[in-house]
Amino acid sequence: MPSDANTAENYVETPKTLTELHAEIAAGRTRAADLAASYYERIAAVNPRLNVYLGLTKERAMEQAARVDAAAAKGDPLGPLAGVPVGIKDVLVMKGAPATAGSKILEGYRPPYDATPVSKLEAAGAVLLGKINCDEFAMGSSNENSAYGPVRNPVDTGRVPGGSSGGSAAAVAANMAVATLGTDTGGSIRQPASFCGVVGVLPTYGRVSRYGLIAFASSLDRVGPFAANVRDAATLLGVIAGYDPKDATSSPAPVPDYAAESDRPVEGLRIGVPAEYFGEGLDSEVRAAIEKGIESLKAAGCAVKPVSLPTTKYAIPTYYLVATAEASANLARFDGVRYGYRSPSSANLADMYRHSRDEGFGAEVKRRILLGTYALSAGYYDAYYLKAQQVRRLLAEEFLRAFAEVDAIVTPTAPMPAFKLGEKTGDPLAMYLADIYTVTASLAGICGVSVPCGTTKAGLPVGMQVLAAHLNEGTAFRVARAVEAARR
């Protein structure tokens, strides 16, 4: 951890793993209610500086903690997350709690139901602390697009935590939750995990239900966990994964024991390294940390070999055509009619639509709606959106060919460490390029993990991205665990 003057006060790393917490609560050495209360005290002390939580669900959390303590006192079996304090990104709905998606246009909206991943966490015993700040509608790479102010990186509060799930990553890094849920459309879990020095998981598309997720781009959006270590992240994914009849895109494939899979040795695994991810624009200190991580995999018995993913150079334009087109369609529902913000300065229906959307949406969201509407418009659909979908298919096929030769692919998660607040806000293209190594897996639908693999001279975290084939999260966890173990 750096000694920079901007470092968050009282910053501490998460003291116990999920396994340790579960054992303590089951044995009665720790009460879930006391643990939850201690986290609320921590949030009260640190949140004013970091701006991580937008709202707390204390009554619901303490009721859940009481149920866990009662079950532990009776010796009843406890769920895998019994008493574990968890935060929820504010694009996932919780019954009765505000759900803003970081936007003014949803201010005051309180949904009448829980998102499926939220209900699965609670069924496993988790104590849900509250809703966490994010880029508006999950659109951003720095968490500076929230209508409720930017989140600050706990490692250095003068820097961004990444986006759009920067609040979820910062919550784990600053010990304001043991674990959190985020969402990833083009890198929004993996890049913040890298910037904040925590573990973030991109599940295979369809592995986790999207029911109750406020949509950005429906063919790309995924829900995944953040945790302080790989095994905890694997446990969390095991809880939230699985088929959901409320989500037509969810996979019926059985969910393995990811935590057990993460324990398996990596000796004999084939690791691919794509040259396309190590070219111009990669920070030299990030490169050095990733190369050191690759050497640690060799030392653990992995066979490292080059692979080629040449369509990678088209990934950014492809992503920003597909994602913005879907955003244009998804965000049409926020019109000021049924819920959320309605402009008071409207003389007629057309004015109400126009003013409500103009005043309710932030600049980045409006930029993406306009880009997506243009790409879908008559005369441009074939030239832009359809062409992007064709390139997306080529990219997915390249990954399939690569995974016929290797078990996993490792790359930098981001081309640079966390940048300073305000550094890229005036240059949208520079901001978009922060996702250059993550959008490929998003477009291909494959899974991945960002795991800490080093720090810069200034003490800023660097993450390694471990990618694996569809529904092969267990292999990604194994490799990530080996990288993590090499740093101890």
Image (tube, rainbow, N blue to C red):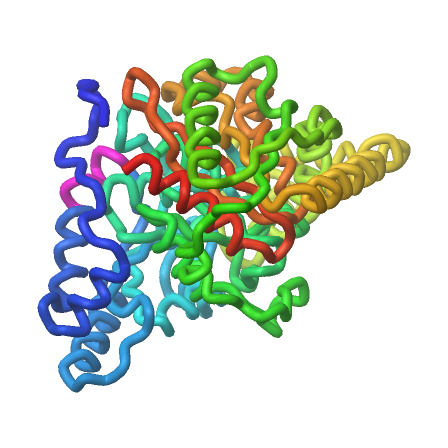
Eyeballing the image, is 112 above or below 301? below
The quarter of the displayed image where residue 365 is located: top right
Observer-nearest residue: 33 or 197? 197
**Residue 11: horizontal and vertical position, in percent?**
18, 36
Left or right: residue 52 versus residue 256 is left
Would you say 150 lies left or right of 416 here? left
Tell me, yes or no, if residue 341 can be seen here: no
Asked whether 454 or 131 is in front, the reply is: 454
User: For the image shown, how many numbered marks are present on the structure?
Assistant: 0
Query: Does the image show residue 16?
Result: yes
Query: Which x, y percent locates residue 310?
Result: 74, 27
In terms of image quadrants, where is residue 270? top right
- Viewer-proximal residue, 323 or 306? 306
Q: Residue at x 78, y 34 (%)?
A: 375
* Residue 29 falls left or right of residue 277: left
Residue, x 61% and y 57% (percent of image)? 471
Q: Which residue: 36% across, 52% down?
A: 180
- Is the residue 256 above or below the residue 278 in the image? below
Residue at x 37%, y 38% (from the top left corner): 148
The correct choice, above or below, for 344 with respect to 117 in the image is: above
Locate the N terminus by quadrant.
top left
Residue span colored magenta: 44-50
- Residue 450 in the image: x percent, y percent? 46, 40
Query: Is 430 displayed left or right of 50 in the figure?
Result: right
Q: Is residue 47 magenta?
A: yes
Determine the main secondary structure of the stretch shown in magenta. helix
Quadrant of the image occupied by residue 458: top left
Classify the position of the C terminus by image quarter.
top left
Q: Is residue 18 magenta?
A: no
**Residue 299 percent location from the top left of the image:** 43, 35
